[in-house]
Amino acid sequence: MSTPPPPPPPYGSDSSYPVSGPVGGYPAAPPPGYAAYGQPGTGGAFVQQKNAGMAIASLVLSLVGIIPCFWGLQVPGLLGVIFGFVGRNQIKKSNGTKKGMGMAIAGIVIGIILVAIAIPVLIWARNHCSRIGGTTTCNSSN
């Protein structure tokens, strides 16, 4: 009878394979010229980017301005434009710690379009509508 083959050597003990990872319970040293993550002299830990609150507010307000009850007086669209420019400036000055430039620009564009549509509507309503008592009537023939 033949004997079973011997068990394979433990992982990393064969000298024909390169050893990677921790050896002897200690983490591997960083490459020359680089400090380990979180060690002194590394410039600090990674800072996660956060969305600029004004950019989010700009987009939300501009989208709220699309609701028909705001078509006559476009306050949300106007606030969306203002908050969009403020958010855009905050993102530019944050040195990469804030994101949301696309939301700020979208809020500005949508808000400008809504305000641009609302101005002629208000002018038309002022010239063609009259309010007598509690009743508003509009004459569309003129």
Image (spheres, rainbow, N blue to C red):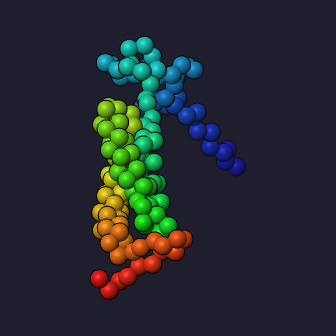
Q: Is residue 99 above or below residue 26?
A: below
Q: Is residue 103 visible?
A: no
Closest to the observer, 40 or 99: 99
Judged from this view, the residue extending furthest toward the front is 133
Residue 81 x %, y %? 35, 51
Query: Where does the image place residue 107, in percent across and percent down from the top left?
Result: 37, 54
Q: Quadrant of the C terminus?
A: bottom left
Looking at the image, residue 28 lies above or below residue 90: above
Q: Residue furthest right?
A: 1
Q: Which residue is at the far top?
A: 40
Residue 100 versus residue 64 in the image, above or below: above
Q: Nearer the viewer, residue 10 or 100?
A: 100
Residue at x 31%, y 32% (from the top left corner): 93
What is the count of numbered marks?
A: 0
| Depth check, front residue: 42 or 68 | 68
Q: Quadrant of residue 114?
A: bottom left
Identify the image quadrant of residue 117.
Answer: bottom left
Q: Residue at x 42, y 55 (%)?
A: 75
Question: Which one is in front, 138 or 114?
Answer: 138
Q: Position of residue 103 (x, y in %)?
A: 38, 51
The location of residue 45, given as percent across then percent down, is: 44, 25
| Observer able to see residue 8 | yes
Residue drawn at the location 32% of the way across and 72% of the way down: 127
Q: Is residue 105 left or right of residue 61?
A: left
What's the residue at 45%, 39% (across, down)? 50
